[in-house]
Amino acid sequence: MRSRPRCTASAWEGAHSPLSWGDIIFEYAARDTCVHPLDPRTKILWLTAVTALAIVLHEPLLLFSLFLLSLLPFALCRPQRATWLRIVAFYLFIFVGTTLSQGFFSTHTGGAEPLFWLIAPDTPVIGAFTGGVAFTLGGAAYGFVQAFRIISILNASLTLVLTTPLNRVILGLSKLGLPPLLAFMITTAVRFVPTVFDEWKMILTAQRARGIPITGRRLIEYSLSPLILSSIRRCNQLALAAESRAFGAGVGRSAYVEIACGPADRYCMGAVAVVTGLLIAAGYWGV
């Protein structure tokens, strides 16, 4: 008589583990904060303003100020402790990545002498081809500052995603004049990453519960095919659901949930306009 595969400790942990990365970083989390009730258009305006400022500002002090300002609404969302830990780890990865990459490859060296050579200019073939690859403090400092651009945009993006349900994001984009089909595509693309994470986690849990050791090569072998098939099935279901609701029919489209700007939204929009104007003026006249 064939024995039944026993549920291993890893399978039990997988089935009862905390939220995955996709859940924690990209998912809407219902909480009682001052940011959650705001109109989605206010948060979209904030994201647009932060993105524009991250592009046009160049002074390190202004970029650091933008980072702190973008962190404030995100902190008011009161994310869970696990969320903070993962986001801090992710941000550290960005800082290290941009610092190292710009330290080696940036032309913004500030006239500093190379600290060391990764590839010396006299290295046969590759040295002559590249002219040598050196690590400079000026390039590293430039990369460290540029990380504030990326992280500021991520802070504003997470503020929107963590505090606004998907249907309200679509509605907010539509009210701002974006075609509903395009708004649906954008929000579905944002939702795609956590959905795939969840699906992959369930597949691994199911395979471990069957007693299949998921290590090394088997991780790809036993999870990739089901993940692709599941993604195709989900796309078909999404297309059928949209078609059955006459999505994209065009004229006279209504919404079950309506949104309206309240006094808090108007105050926030005014604050966003003032902050944007002050930072642009400071960048123009110099700090």
Image (cartoon, grey):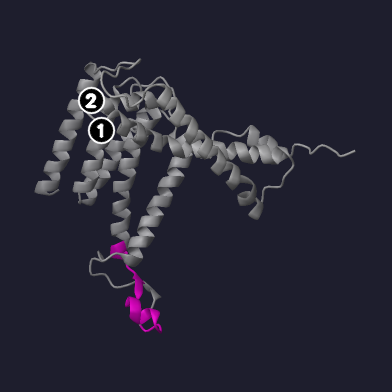
Residue type at mark 1 is: Trp
Residue 64 x/y as whole percent: 27, 45
Q: Residue furthest left?
A: 285
Residue pointed to by mark 1:
46
- Identify residue type, mark 2: Cys
214, above or below 79, in the image: below
Q: Are marks 1 and 2 in contact (CB under 8 Å)?
A: yes
Whether 130 is among the magenta residues is yes
Q: Which mark is residue 18?
A: none
Residue 174, x across and y down, in percent? 27, 26
Query: In the image, 86: left or right of 262?
Result: right
Q: CA distance from mark 1 to mark 2?
A: 9 Å
Quadrant of the image occupied by residue 49: top left
As drawn, the residue found furthest toward the right would be 1
Q: Which residue is identified by label 2? A: 268
Q: Quadrant of the N terminus?
A: top right
Looking at the image, is 259 positioned above or below residue 60? above
In the displayed structure image, the side of residue 89 where residue 102 appears, left or right: left
Q: Secondary structure at mark 1?
A: helix
State whether residue 61 appears in this view: yes
In the image, what residue occupies the spot 63% across and 41% down? 204
Looking at the rendered structure, the number of numbered marks drawn on it comes to 2
Residues rendered magenta in the picture: 122-139
Q: Judge the density around disc 2: few (<14), some (14-19), many (≥20) Cα neighbours within 10 Å.
A: some
Q: Secondary structure at mark 2?
A: helix
- 82 in magenta: no
Mark 1 is surrounded, within 10 Å at the Cα level, by few (under 14), some (14 to 19) or many (20 or more) other residues, namely: many
Can you say whether 133 is above or below 190 in the image?
A: below
